[in-house]
Amino acid sequence: MLYFIIFTIYIVVNLIIAYFMKNAAELKGYDSSAHAFGIAFWFGIWGAVYVCALPDLKMQRKLDDLIELQSKNLKKEQEPINTSANKTSVENAQKKVVESTDKYNNGLPKL
């Protein structure tokens, strides 16, 4: 009789662990094809460790989308903008740099 009670408690605990591991797998983006419930039920704590070690598919998809968006934005930034206003602003910036270096080098001997 004692063995039956211990076995029943073992089964109930495994069912509870399996239920929570199934929910954890669903939160990570897995459907029933991961068989998280069965693995956690039959293998007990080792099945729970396996389900915890599954990679997070939702986060992986978000990161892939982020990388794709960043690469698109990088391509847009690398396209040259050929406008006359842009050319004059670059020329003005270059003149200011030359003027500022000349101002600081006035008292120094040239090599």
Image (cartoon, grey):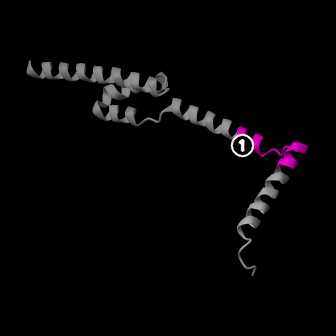
Residue extending farthest right: 84
Residue 109: x %, y % from top left = 73, 79
* 16 relative to 102 in the view: left or right: left
The residue depicted at 85 percent of the width and 53 percent of the height is 91
Q: Which residue is mark 1?
A: 74
Q: Is residue 83 visible?
A: no
The residue depicted at 31 percent of the width and 31 percent of the height is 43
User: Residue flagged by tag 1: what amino acid is it?
Assistant: Leu
Q: Is residue 94 above or below residue 67?
A: below
Q: Main secondary structure of the magenta part?
A: helix
The residue depicted at 37 percent of the width and 29 percent of the height is 39
Residue 92: x %, y % from top left = 83, 52
Q: Quadrant of residue 27?
A: top left
The residue depicted at 67 percent of the width and 35 percent of the height is 69
Bin the neighbour count of mark 1 within 10 Å (Cα to Cα): few under 14, some 14-19, many 20 and up: few
* 49 relative to 73 in the view: left or right: left
Residue extending farthest bottom: 111
Residue 2: x %, y % from top left = 8, 21
| Residue range (magenta) | 72-89
Looking at the picture, tell me which residue is in the foreground, 62 or 37: 62
Looking at the picture, tell me which residue is in the foreground, 23 or 92: 92
Where is the C terminus found, in terms of image quarters?
Answer: bottom right
